[in-house]
Image (spheres, helix red, strand yellow):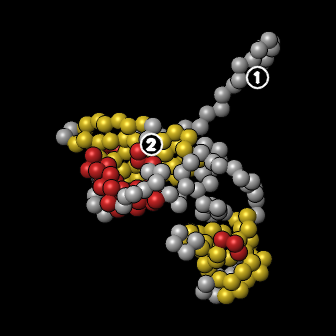
Amino acid sequence: MRNKYNYDELVKVSGVGKIFGKVKEKLGIIIEKDYYFAEYYVDLFFGKKDWFKEENIQRVFNEKKNKVEKYQIRLCTTKQGYKLIENNLRKNEPISNNKLGKINIYKEFRKGKKEYIAIGWESVFWPVSNKSIQIMEATVKSFRRQDIPYQYIILNEDNLTDIKVYEFIENDNAVDIFYVERKIKMKKLRNRPPFEW
């Protein structure tokens, strides 16, 4: 997982909230995470929304044990958008484990007079604590204000429900080039008679 707890995940909270004080064994839903303070904003059932430290929160379902999840990541934007990402990363060097230097997919294409770049990563650990990922995602979030089209997809290879799609394609749908598809395939049958449905 990119965070210890996912957004919209059911959790149990016991601890002191930043706004309303102490709670004991209350259920709630994760709304967001403050990465600076490493706190989660939780909407408590039969209570109020409040900020809690990570150690005050417990997962209710599917406790994971030291499993590193891999992601497929895709980003398509204009050449201008890509250059902005490169420049923002360069301004913040040195960066250890710079994910932009480790892309698996790179494709340039044109539509009309505009140039576009599509990049991607296959089976990669994508932690939100990584400095290069934080800078890339903050830059991509600024694209809408700058009228730069983009499509950004984060797909968890292990968890079918963990798919995030962020896009701004209203001003230019040329960046709308990715789609997510899940398939069920039949294994090859060795020395087994055919069967009927």
Q: Which residue is mark 2?
A: 102
Q: Residues within 10 Å of mark 1 (few under 14, many from 20)?
A: few
Given residues 113 and 80, the one toward you in this image is 80
Q: Is residue 21 left or right of residue 130?
A: right
Q: Residues within 10 Å of mark 2 (few under 14, many from 20)?
A: few
Q: Quadrant of the N terminus?
A: bottom right
- The amino acid type, in three-letter code, at marker 2 is Lys
Residue 25 at x, y percent in the picture: 78, 77
Q: Which mark is residue 81?
A: none
Query: What kind of residue is marked 1?
Result: Trp
Residue in view at x 41 percent, y 47 percent: 100
Residue 162: % across, % down = 60, 51
Q: Residue, x 28% and y 61% (percent of image)?
A: 146
188 shown above or below 39: above
Task: Name the residue located 37 percent from the left edge and 45 percent from the top edge.
Answer: 76
**Residue 48 placed where, x, y %?**
64, 82
Point out the residue furthest to the left here.
113
Secondary element under disc 2, as helix, strand or loop, is: helix
